[in-house]
Image (tube, helix red, strand yellow):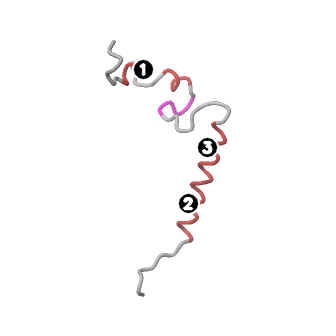
Amino acid sequence: MDAKVFKPERWLEPNGITKKAQEVKGYHHLLTFGDGPRSRIRKTFALAEIKVCVHYLAVVQCSPSGI
């Protein structure tokens, strides 16, 4: 095995999903927020941040300068 060559497929199963991702029920392909005791707080914070951004975009009124 050549450790200096980048081959991510060496860690994948034949179906293209890692063993850790296969253990997670539901969204096997999406481990954005990870797994474990602190995953919920990260997800909650990210969703709150998205809601604030969407609200800000809905409230802000932009107009061309000089009008």
**Where on the picture, by quarter, is residue 13?**
top left
Residue shown at 55% from the left, 61% from the top: 54
Specify the segment rendered in magenta: 25-29
Mark 3 element type: helix
Mark 1 or mark 3, which has the lower sequence index? 1
**In the rendered image, the vertical position of residue 51 relative to residue 13, given as above or below:** below
Residue 30: x and y in percent read 49, 35
Three-letter residue code for mark 3: Lys
Three-letter residue code for mark 1: Trp
Residue 58: x and y in percent read 54, 68
| Depth check, front residue: 23 or 67 | 67
3D distance between C-alphas at marks 2 and 1: 37 Å
Q: State the residue position of label 1.
A: 11
Residue shown at 64% from the left, 46% from the top: 44
Q: Residue furthest bottom?
A: 67
**Where on the picture, by quarter, is residue 43?**
top right
Q: State the residue position of label 3.
A: 43
Horizontal side, residue 27 vs residue 64: left or right: right
Three-letter residue code for mark 2: Cys
Whether the magenta-drawn stretch holds residue 54 is answered as no
**In the rendered image, the vertical position of residue 52 relative to residue 21, given as above or below:** below
Q: Main secondary structure of the magenta part?
A: loop
Mark 2 or mark 1, which has the lower sequence index? 1
Mark 2 element type: helix
Q: State the residue position of label 2.
A: 53
Residue 50: x and y in percent read 57, 54
Mark 1 element type: helix
